[in-house]
Image (cartoon, rainbow, N blue to C red):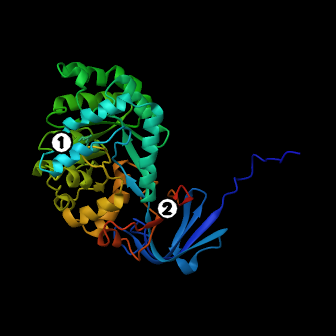
């Protein structure tokens, strides 16, 4: 006999309470101590299926199917890594070695990865992506954005996005990473491809359109044409802006209401003012400055001006080969003069803002059940104890993942 099913009864979900949390970061000032982190001491979180349904004092937690004892450790929202480049093959160890012996970073190395990526099979690219995703997940990343940009042909860009879209909703078309080596003599024709046939093939698989607006990549006018064409196809802009030098990227991002201007290392006062008067998030990527021995972005200046700041890994084989959000938090605190509270906010709520999402990056009723349990009494330890694997357990969409 088959089990009768009723279309009217709700799907039975399992409820779980995580209790005895010494310190819980909610990112909701109305829930906690009134600071932006919305800290609750001696807290509990109740998960129902893939959602959070209750947050409060541990002693008041409602009865649930399961109970997990946090044993006086800290819980934060899962990290939101809003900027990565994970569809690629090969690595660039030699280039890194050369840099660490004094060579400087140029985006020219991107061509090495383009050649390796084009030569790789779909299976290799997906296996590579999964390896870095798993690495990131074990370090507390529960949402990630990732980009194409190492194919630079219609076929290779579209397949990168298809592969990425199997693993995240936050997929970005970056056909305009650099001018394809095949078009070195005719950059205008490449821009035509990126805004034409390549865009048509890629738009169905992506949510965002990005461009590397920088000397040696795409200038302001080219970047505007690329982002505007993407917008017309339903993609929303985000911009690689002002990484290697001053330029029009940040102003363009604000002009086009981009969700985020990423890197923001070289900023004029006008750039800072433009960001402060916009919805565009400044996404800082300290792994890139670390791995290229470049000057740090001035996070303090942005925060003091009222700009919303996100922190992300930029994970890619050239400029920042780390998948670790805790590492980026530690760098941001030590070298970009963010407070530990600000850095943890930027790595969670800030990333959500950079993806224009309200269901992630916070711990409260209705939010997605994405959490990281730290083997530490507070989130401050992420910066205080750099390099230590403090993330001990992760819940993603309510599913408990042991590290
Ligand atoms: O965000 N700046 C452009 N793109 C990447 C680096 C890509 C590479 O070097 O492979 C970045 O840093
Ligand atoms: Fe990047």
Which quadrant of the figure has residue 195? top left
Q: Secondary structure at mark 1?
A: helix
Identify the residue at image location x=34%, y=42%. 85
Which quadrant of the figure has residue 198? top left
Which quadrant of the figure has residue 120? top left
Taking the image as four quarters, which one is ligand 1 found in?
Answer: top left
**Residue 19 horizontal side relative to residue 119, left or right:** right
Q: Closest to the observer: 308 or 338?
A: 338
Query: Height in image: 376 above or below 266?
Result: below
Q: Is residue 142 visible?
A: no
Whole-number angstrom distance, CA of label 1 to CA of label 2: 41 Å
The residue identified by callout 1 is 251
Q: Is residue 123 visible?
A: yes
Q: Secondary structure at mark 2?
A: loop
How packed mark 2 is, by other alpha carbons closer than 10 Å (few <14, some 14-19, many 20 or more), is: some
Query: Height in image: 265 above or below 303?
Result: above
Q: Quadrant of the N terminus?
A: top right
| Residue 277 numbered tag | none
**Residue 97 horizontal side relative to residue 144, left or right:** left
Residue 127 x/y as whole percent: 46, 41
Residue 203 x/y as whole percent: 40, 29
Residue 81 x/y as whole percent: 37, 52
Q: Closest to the observer: 197 or 366?
A: 197
Identify the residue at image location x=39%, y=45%. 145
The residue identified by callout 2 is 403
Identify the residue at image location x=48%, y=43%. 167
Identify the residue at image location x=31%, y=42%. 91
């Amino acid at each position: 006999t088959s089990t009768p099913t009723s279309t009217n009864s709700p799907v039975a979900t399992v409820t779980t309470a995580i209790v005895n949390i010494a310190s819980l970061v909610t990112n909701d000032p109305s829930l906690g101590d009134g600071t932006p982190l919305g800290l609750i001491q001696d807290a509990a979180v109740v998960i129902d299926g893939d959602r959070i349904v209750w947050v409060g004092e541990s002693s008041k937690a409602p009865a649930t199917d399961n109970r997990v004892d946090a044993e006086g450790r800290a819980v934060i929202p899962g990290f939101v890594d809003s900027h990565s480049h994970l569809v690629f093959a090969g690595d660039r160890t030699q280039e890194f070695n050369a840099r660490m012996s004094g060579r400087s970073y140029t985006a020219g190395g991107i061509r090495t990865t383009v050649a390796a990526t084009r030569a790789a099979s779909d299976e290799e690219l997906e296996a590579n992506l999964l390896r870095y995703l798993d690495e990131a997940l074990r370090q507390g990343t529960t949402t990630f954005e990732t980009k194409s940009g190492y194919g630079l042909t219609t076929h290779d860009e579209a397949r990168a996005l298809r592969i990425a879209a199997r693993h995240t909703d936050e997929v970005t078309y970056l056909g305009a990473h650099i001018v394809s080596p095949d078009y070195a003599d005719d950059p205008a024709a490449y821009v035509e491809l990126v805004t034409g046939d390549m865009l048509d093939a890629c738009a169905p698989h992506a949510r965002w359109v990005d461009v590397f607006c920088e000397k040696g990549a795409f200038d302001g006018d080219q970047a505007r044409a690329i982002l505007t064409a993407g917008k017309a196809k339903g993609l929303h802009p985000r911009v690689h802006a002002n990484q290697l030098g001053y330029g029009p990227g940040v102003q363009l991002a604000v002009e086009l209401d981009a969700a985020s201007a990423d890197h923001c290392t070289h900023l004029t006062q006008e750039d800072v003012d433009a960001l402060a008067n916009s919805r565009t998030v400044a996404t800082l990527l300290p792994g890139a400055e670390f791995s290229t021995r470049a000057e740090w972005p001035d996070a303090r200046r942005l925060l003091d001006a009222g700009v919303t700041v996100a922190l992300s890994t930029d994970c890619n084989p050239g400029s920042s080969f780390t998948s670790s959000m805790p590492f980026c938090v530690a760098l941001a605190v030590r070298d970009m003069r963010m407070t530990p509270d600000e850095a943890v906010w930027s790595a969670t709520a800030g990333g959500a803002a950079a993806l224009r999402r309200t269901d992630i990056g916070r711990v409260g009723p209705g939010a997605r059940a994405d959490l990281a349990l730290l083997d530490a009494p507070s989130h401050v330890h992420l910066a205080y104890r750099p390099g230590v694997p403090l993330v001990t357990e992760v819940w993603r969409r309510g599913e408990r993942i042991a590290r």
